[in-house]
Amino acid sequence: MTEVVATNQTILVVGAGISGITAAVEAAETGKNVVLVEKRPYMGGRISQLYKYFPKLCFPSCGLEINQRRLSAQGGITVLTMAEVTGVTGSEGDYTASVKISPRFVNENCTACGACGDVVEAEFDNEHNYGLDKRKGAYLPYNMAKPQRYVIDPRIIGTDDAEKAKAACKYDAVDLDMQEEIVEFKAGAIIWATGWTPYDAAKIQPYGYDRYDNVITSVEFERMMDKFGPTGGKILRPGDGKEAKDIAFIQCAGSRDRNHLKHCSRICCMASLKQSTYITEQYGVDDADAKGTIYYIDIRSIDRFEDFYRKVQEDPKITFVKSKVANIIFDKENNPVVKGVDTEGYHRYETKHDLVVLAVGMEPSVNKDTFPVEVVINEHGFIEADEANGGIFAAGCASDALDVNRAVQSATAAALRAVQVVNRVAGAEG
């Protein structure tokens, strides 16, 4: 059984992406006890699925590792993975949280040797790669996953594959008898850092994401560039496996649209600008066939991002077309053909590309209709900063559509507010 030692001076952080880890570490470094709850089998969130950050184009594994090291150095943080908060009762300074912990079927003896994965035959869509490839029924979620421990997919429990995995383990780490647990514990304040989810591109019917193989999303493109990703770091068309050199990037795919997400998702412009640099990275400056086209309503690159925008504008391989793309069709060779009107010159275009990348919008991971605790949520599904929330504070993309830098700032602010609450509790009890 999992035991959580917590009091009304403990801070509960829900979500262990970059915002949750930041909030947990910042709170712990002030001397507070923290319980960090993550529904995935590992920490890191969507940062772990990115290839590079903008505007420096550095790899997120570096920043993620630094934060994980900070977390490991703090003795006051209890981490629960494969765990979800199912309910919260009480009020500021005196909450009781109910947390459901799903079985991993692998215990702390695991050395991540991979023997269980080698013998298991069943395969499932790889969530870390957005379903672009398959993973085994016994798997390590990704190479830097923390905890560095395998997971047995519950769909193979009771099958020969599960028994093979158990027999292959030399460390007695595979435990097929693990059961779901419900734990309850106290907390004085709660930081909600459940992050974001990409908007469902299949809902944007004119773009044909659910009908055409060679239309992908921006988050899938990130995984494609990673050498540990589904294509080994190569830009390949899902439809036929051929190299994609002429790439279209479509802005506001689901954002700023009354039929989809009304809000601006803020990261999309910079994501497409960043991803346009991947073309030269992949094929070099001398390949005349390698080029990109960014279809945009307007480019929102504020503050320090403006210099990055100018740099991309100066790249002769990148073309900008001011237009809301009307629709995408496919020719006989399965090439996507982008159609619309250039609003700067009001010229109709019908342009063939090898691959289309949709810069999908950002929405909160937790649906406002299924939120497990009473908080003030705006029309877009984000948690509002409101006194009615008591000791519950939103961090990162649970509070708004934010890039990594602003999400970290938001998490630090949330941690300070939570610390103030538990300090008041301590003062009142003292």
Image (cartoon, grey):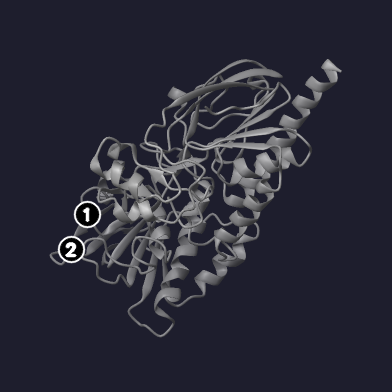
Q: Mark 1: give few (<14), some (14-19) or many (20+) Cα within 10 Å.
A: some
Q: Secondary structure at mark 2?
A: loop
Residue 80 position, x and y percent, is: 55, 35
| Residue 201 shown left or right of residue 270 in the figure | left
Q: Earlier in the sequence, mark 2 or mark 1?
A: 1
Assess whether mark 1 and mark 2 are in contact (beta carbons under 8 angstroms): yes
Q: Looking at this view, name the residue that lies furthest to the right.
A: 430
The quarter of the displayed image where residue 419 is located = top right
The image's mark for residue 212 is: 1
Could you tell me the amino acid type at mark 2?
A: Asn
Q: Residue at x 46, y 40 (%)?
A: 40
Q: Secondary structure at mark 1?
A: loop
Q: Which residue is mark 2?
A: 334
Please tell me whether residue 100 is drawn above or below residue 335 in the rendered image.
Answer: above
Q: Is residue 92 visible?
A: no
Closer-to-camera residue (5/67):
5
Residue 16 position, x and y percent, is: 56, 41
Q: Looking at this view, name the residue that lies furthest to the left.
A: 332
| Residue 330 shown left or right of residue 142 in the figure | left
| Residue 131 shown left or right of residue 276 in the figure | left
Q: Looking at this view, name the residue that lies furthest to the top.
A: 90
Q: Is residue 20 visible?
A: yes
Closer-to-camera residue (28/384):
28
Q: Residue at x 56, y 38 (%)?
A: 400
